[in-house]
Image (cartoon, rainbow, N blue to C red):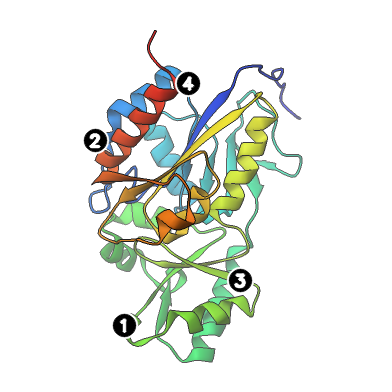
Amino acid sequence: MRRDVSPKAIVPCVVIFTDLDGTLLDHDTYAWEEAKPALNLCKALKVPLILVSSKTRAEMNVLRNELGLTSPFISENGGGIFFPEEGLHPVPPDSVVEAGLWKWSLGLPYQSLVKALREIRDELGWKIRGFSDMSHEEISDLTGLDLESSRLASLREYDEPFILVEEGKRDPDVLYDAAKQRGLNITSGGRFYHLHGKNDKGVSVDKLVAWYGEQHSYVMTMALGDSPNDFSMLKRVTHPVLVRSSRQFPELQALIPGLQVTKEKGPKGWNAAVLEILNKEFPKT
């Protein structure tokens, strides 16, 4: 049964989309405490904070509960959008209720991606290891996550993370072409390559902006990320922010007008950028 829907608000809406690892979360420790001032301001101003990650729904549910968030969130590089079942906004007509959340699937089923990656591995003769090949212990070694968090990371629905065992000896373009021949895409994250369908973070951001636009007269958007798999998201928003990392992307500012690059890495840089934008949008009176 569909939930009741509040009437369209005449006031504008500010929505913040954020990547997690290396952005809101520290790349190595996964800590977010340095972002507390901005997180608290988002809550005080009732600004929706949308988590957008290559992480699984199971992982993100733990984090959103830890952060006290009730906004929708986007899992596995745009493969799925999840809405709290108790919210007041309408949900997409093709979404379904599952484990207390409305699930809107945009990506391909996980097992089809596992099959495709194994075909690509056999075709190229490369040493490729996907999450489906790894134990929880191996995922833990590669990510620094504890075993329970590694188990949650393995509960994939729309995206197969993988590594190239001999990456320096391989041309990634060959890999990308093999995926494209199968109607699939590969993106590069902070630690892994990711094989997925036509979904990406940018497509899912577009859909959520349109969803918020049905409820508000105007939607101002901000997005923060640190890796190539965030670029499609940064291109879609009013205020794009590249959170500084060990990698450099000098060409990005020419591709994304108005791109801001933080001075600090991880949650410290995230905090400064979000505070700056919110203080501009909500000046103290």
Q: Residues within 10 Å of mark 3 (few under 14, many from 20)?
A: some
Q: Residue at x 44, y 56 (%)?
A: 254
Upstream in sequence: badge 4 or badge 3: 4
Circle nearer the N terminus (3, 1): 1
Q: Residues within 10 Å of mark 4 (few under 14, many from 20)?
A: few
How far across and how far down the image is residue 88, in percent? 64, 23
Q: CA distance from mark 2 to mark 1?
A: 35 Å
Mark sitting earlier along the chain (2/1): 2
Residue 184 badge: 3
| Label 1 crowd bin: few (<14), some (14–19), many (20+), radius 10 Å | few
Would you say the residues marked 2 and 4 are in contact, meaning their CB atoms lie under 8 Å apart? no
Quadrant of image for the N terminus = top right
SS of the residue under disc 1 = helix
Q: Residue at x 61, y 17 (%)?
A: 11
Q: Which residue is mark 2?
A: 34
Which mark sits nearer the N-terminus, 2 or 4?
2
The disc placed on residue 46 is 4
User: What kind of residue is marked 3?
Assistant: Leu
Image quadrant where one finds the C terminus: top left
Q: Nearer the viewer, residue 172 or 240?
A: 240
Q: Quadrant of residue 99?
A: top right
Q: Are marks 4 and 1 in contact (CB under 8 Å)?
A: no
Name the secondary structure under disc 3.
loop
* Residue 34 or residue 156, whichever sits in front: 34
Distance of mark 2 from mark 4, alpha carbons? 20 Å
- Which residue has dot 1 on it? 168
Using the rendered view, name the quadrant where residue 247 is placed.
bottom left
